[in-house]
Image: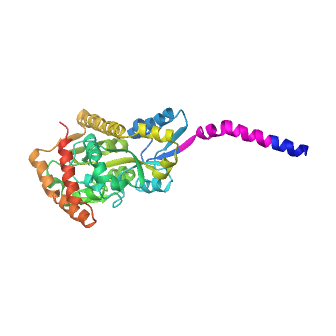
Amino acid sequence: MKKILMKFAVMSLAAILWLAVGPSAVRSETIYLKMAHFMSPLHIQHQKSFLPFAKQVEDLTGGQVKIKVFPSETLGGATQLAEAVKTGVADIAFIVPSYTPGRFPRTSALDLPFLFESAEHTTKVFYDLYDRYLAEDYKDYKVLWLYSCDPGQFFFVSKPVRKLEELKGMKIRASSAPMSQALKLLGANPVGMPLSELHMALDKKIIDGTLAPTSAVYDFKISDLIQHSTRLNIYTAPMAVVMNREKFNSLPDSAKKAIEQASGKARGLRAARLYDALDADLVKKMNEGGQKKTHTLSAAEKKKFMREIKAMETEWAEKAAKEGLPARDLLAAVHRSAAKNKPK
């Protein structure tokens, strides 16, 4: 009997202690989140966007939420991250919608050529159209922020291109399916390959050049191989940082609030401006010492490029309409927003 009473007393004390400290202990349990991207740990977005976001969330939660950032394709390659975050391999991921054709059909309207002048310009339009036209693409995710890289330019290892005719027959690395189509229409021969293989392909003259943002030329260490650049602002690449929706919904309200406070449009615009500032700085460096040259085409010559690929919009709209999307309304909205938000 004495043993039974002692056991009951111990159990009662344990219950009292749990009631006293249990809920707070549960609330204060550290939450670890995995954030993935495919760029190097030296990339400007890793250093000045992703790490500061993780730190801000940790600070706002008093250390309750810790986000570990996994760079360099640790949790998945560039084309795999949209699926990785959806399935929970990563809790948060940086994605480029155009890397997974068909998965973000509405957002692909922003991949069309000659729409935007800068990363900030694209980002403003992305947010402007998101709620009404694009949100359905991201129904499986919690979107943390949207943005874009700096505009894509032509980069060549030897011969400059100052006229449309000079591009004919050149082997150019394409950044996406839309840009592959654009290169064909311009008379070039598109070559698809990941950025990780670009240095080798340029070094061995397997290709004549690449279509890429200026920032990528330096981030992926190919600037030493580039002798000429033709600036056309031919495209930008919409990007997003997304979170597994179930994971987000499972978090305590305080953690949700901190993540939302640390993300959003303000962070997206800051990330875009990082790219634009880097673009401007690197263009100056390309022209230092007279070794590398940046070429800006005349308005008349640029119109030739634009005229050759104008049909892409019509083709995109026809295909999207067959898939049940409000293609013409969306395309018209893109042009209106691009005009409204155009840099002055």
Find out whether residue 99 is within the magenta segment.
no
The stretch in magenta equals 10-32
Q: Quadrant of residue 261?
A: top left
Left or right: residue 314 versus residue 126 is left
Quadrant containing the C terminus is top left
Residue at x 22%, y 50% (from the top left corner): 334
| Vertical arrangement, residue 313 with respect to residue 117, above or below | below
Q: What count of labels does the image hold?
A: 0
Residue at x 51%, y 53% (from the top left corner): 89
Find out whether residue 24 is within the magenta segment.
yes
Residue at x 90%, y 46% (from the top left corner): 1
The percent position of residue 232, horizontal first and vertical second, equals 19, 46
Q: Identify which residue, 199 or 164, lies in the foreground.
A: 164
Which color scheme did the rendering employ for the protein?
rainbow
Q: Quadrant of residue 271?
A: top left
| Vertical arrangement, residue 342 with respect to residue 74, above or below | above
Q: Identify which residue, 273 or 183, lies in the foreground.
A: 273
The percent position of residue 181, horizontal first and vertical second, equals 24, 60
Left or right: residue 67 versus residue 268 is right
The percent position of residue 126, horizontal first and vertical second, equals 28, 47
Left or right: residue 62 versus residue 123 is right
Q: Residue furthest bottom?
A: 322
Q: Main secondary structure of the magenta part?
A: helix
The percent position of residue 114, horizontal first and vertical second, equals 19, 50
Residue 174 in view: no
Residue at x 28%, y 51% (from the top left corner): 132
Q: Residue furthest right?
A: 1
